[in-house]
Amino acid sequence: MVNIVLVSPKIPQNTGTIGRTCVSTGATLHIVKPIPFELDEKRIRRAGLDYWPKLDLHVWESIEDFWTAHPMDDRHFFATTKTTQSYFEVEFLPGDFIYFGSEDTGLPEGLMARRETGKITIPMRKEFRSLNQSNAVSIVLYEAVRQNIALTDSWRD
């Protein structure tokens, strides 16, 4: 499936929920430090339930370390409110990387400048600023699943 990249997440419960969603879809979760919590703390375990140990999880010390292992190309997408390109307009492929920023500040502009055409957004009413991080990940991840479900045999009928 795809790769979800959390850049400096701040809320352990969101991270636990995202991990659980990744397990249920077959996605890999990448977490880029710094993070202000331990990945084995109770709040993550509670949100991730017994799925967390089954998670394909990779933790990176920095975004540069992540990019050394996964060089930037046209299969890296940045979820942000700072674009008009909807995630509906993207054809997701297995192996894609979809980035989400911290709950309070989103993705840094400098990071997204690495690939301007890779910015995607979730349409929402104008008076709202953003969605909960775990909800946003679920929305975009399940679109990638919808587009690629025929490529896997591990899904229930």
Image: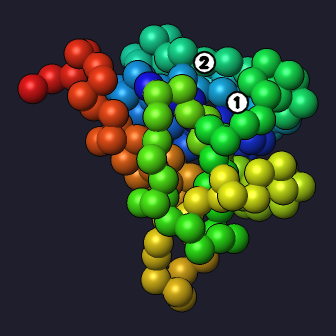
Residue 131 placement (x, y as % from top left): 52, 64
Q: In this orientation, which residue lies closer to the viewer: 104 or 6?
A: 6
Residue 146 placement (x, y as % from top left): 29, 42
Quadrant position of the N terminus in the picture: top left
Looking at the rendered structure, the secondary structure element under dot 1 is strand
Q: Quadrant of residue 117?
A: bottom right
Label drawn at residue 31:
1
Looking at the picture, which amino acid does disc 2 mark?
A: Leu
Q: Is residue 114 left or right of residue 145?
A: right
Q: Which residue has dot 2 on it? A: 57
Q: Is residue 154 left or right of residue 82?
A: left
Regarding residue 103, the answer to whether it shows in the image is no
Residue 20 placement (x, y as % from top left): 43, 29
Find the distance from the CA under tag 2 to the CA under tag 1. Answer: 8 Å
Q: How packed is label 1: few (under 14 Cα within 10 Å), some, or many (20 or more)?
A: many
Residue 103 placement (x, y as % from top left): 67, 55
The reply to whether callout 2 and callout 1 are in contact (CB within 8 Å) is yes
Q: How packed is label 2: few (under 14 Cα within 10 Å), some, or many (20 or more)?
A: some
The outermost residue toward the left is 157
Label drawn at residue 1:
none
Regarding residue 106, the answer to whether it shows in the image is yes
Looking at the picture, which amino acid does disc 1 mark?
A: Ile
The outermost residue toward the top is 53
